[in-house]
Amino acid sequence: MLAAGGLLAGSTVVGLLPTLAGASSHREAPLILNDPAVDNTDVYAFSSPENPDNVTLIANWIPFEEPNGGPNFYPFAEDAEYLINIDNDGDAVADYIYRWQFTTEDLRGQETFLFNNGPVDSLDDENLLFRQSFTLDVSTDGGATFGEPVAQGPVAPSYVGPASMGTPQDYVDNLRTPAITEVAGGGRTLTTQTEDPFFVDLRVFDLLFGADLSETGVDTLGGYNVNSIVLEVPKTEVAIDGDAAGNPVIGVWSTTTRPTLRNANGTAADGADDFTQVSRLGNPLVNEVVVPAGLKDAFNSIPPAEDAAAAGGAVVDRVLQPEVPALIEAIYGVPAPAGPRFDIFETFLTGVVTNDRVDVDGDPATPNPIDVDLNSQAINAGAAEFVPSEMLRLNMAITGPTGLNMQPLPEASRLGVVGGDIQGFPNGRRLSDDVVDIEILALEGIFDVTNVPADRQAAFDALQGGDGVAQNDVAFMDVFPYIAAPHGDAVNQGPGRTEDGGMPSGGVDAGAGGSAAAGGSVNSTVVPALTGSAALLLVASGAGSLLHGRHLRRSSTTTEG
């Protein structure tokens, strides 16, 4: 049974640090910068809106896909493994590993540079000269072996533009929806391009939004695309012993592997059977901000079971004594909560759970501010000996917006648990969860927006606007695959450009913290926040800064490779 609202809300410290990281693991580590095709960007896990008996898992790759980025656009890597991992018993070892592998048919040869040589209105259209397909199989022994494929099907190609593929809605109808493939045992999967569903103002890296909160309100990722793998399966497929009622909590993370032996051009060498993990993502923003620069590549290479031991416990130390609150205090004069931060340790490494199930701090004399059961695998009836580890944890029994009193809510809160909705982040992650604002508020000791402590009121007045980006730049879908269509317009809308409907009109424009001058964001799309101007509120509170289309004619023949 959940405890009082204030206590539960206190648990939402949800990885506060990561909030200030910018895009969720977009270009987060030095080595992965050189291999964007296998760079994980975000992971989402939520009960499926269309069927509460199913769970939806979404993992995205390839950050900052500019829609006009031809001629090769954005294929999945043929020699990589794209993986979604699930630990259902809490031992930090994957109980299920879903693996997607891709093959390519490139018919362009020496005849053309074009991705397609005419309009494309179906997956088997003769004008589509570059095609990919996938094979999905599953491992139940930690990746040692994989069974027979549970799904095989086409990849929805990159969206080339209106002359080639019609409007974004045409793309969805003609190319993406037909690529949805059934999964053996129940469920469905889709591999496709989508607009980047993460929304954030990345000018956080300029001394935390300009050192005076003047640099907020621009969705830096608006207009960009990513590659997405969507999987929806019955909850009984991933729960211990198929019992989703008695064992409702799962931990989820995505990884990518590359062949250990590779040729000089980066392709897999002959006989390269061994694969090396090169990218990893669970909770948003952990590797970007919680993990220091010198450990980022190592974090990308290890499994959750090694988290506590990595670099002599350096990662755990950074969770307990985070850097970002100290930066906020130095720049904005907002006092940092006292450490060690066992609340963050619990959220990242154990899930929200009572002390009698998991002793998160190892010192009974140290009070733990989180003492409720919500989303740790330790609450499962069939739980193993629990091992703290970083992953995104989801309580699948919570199937709709739910209040702190366990009663249904009329609508979801974008602030998740901080907003009084325990279905949201950090209990899994829905597409519309505003993880940046959730974490900023929780980081500053504001755990319940309906009951702000008197001593935190000034901080709330100053920071309630967060990064000023309260929602995605386009609406999500209410049916599978839930993600939106990919963007087709150039992110850089220079003079004379027209729109195809993918982005709000306007070029590089100033507004709500945006700047058209040198140094301003190429994408200055202003997204209205649900709260007032954070910068004005900051000044008012006295917490000042301490630092200053036309279609081509269809070819009558197919170009052979």
Image (spheres, rainbow, N blue to C red):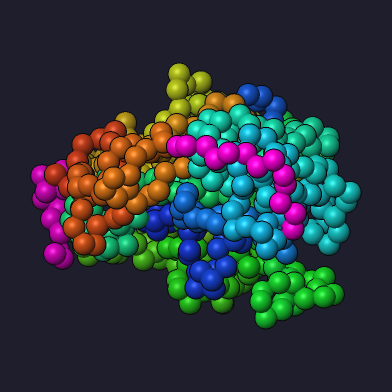
**Residue closest to the eye, 29 or 33:** 33
Asked if residue 462 can be seen in this view, the reply is no
**Relative to residue 405, is residue 281 drawn left or right?**
right
- Indicate whether residue 541 is drawn in magenta: yes
**Foreground residue, 97 or 526?**
526
**Spot occupied by residue 140 in the image (x, y as percentages of width and height):** 82, 51
State the image quarter where residue 154 is shown. Answer: top right
User: Is 93 contained in the magenta span?
Assistant: no
In this view, the residue farthest toward the right is 148
- Please name whichever residue, 472 or 408, is drawn nearer the observer in this view of the structure: 472
What residue appears at the point 42 percent right and 63 percent down from the top-left corner? 289
Q: Quadrant of the N terminus?
A: top right
Q: How many marks?
A: 0
> Please, is residue 263 above or below residue 438 in the view?
below
Furthest residue to the top?
410
The answer to whether one can see residue 202 in this image is yes
Q: At x 53% / y 30%, what residue is drawn? A: 169
Quadrant (top left, top right, bottom left, bottom right) of the C terminus: bottom right
- Front-lying residue, 389 or 303: 303
Q: Whole-percent x and y of residue 557?
A: 72, 44
**Residue positioned 22% across, 47% down in the render:** 509
Residue farthest to the bottom, as pictured: 264
In the image: residue 196, left or right of residue 279: left
Residue at image point 34% right, 40% down: 498
Q: Is residue 156 above or below residue 34?
A: above
Which span of residues is magenta-colored?
A: 537-561
Quadrant position of residue 325: bottom left
SS assignment for the magenta stretch, majority: loop
Q: In this image, 90 relative to 390: left or right?
A: right
**Can you give x and y, in whole percent of width and height, for residue 195 in the image?**
49, 43
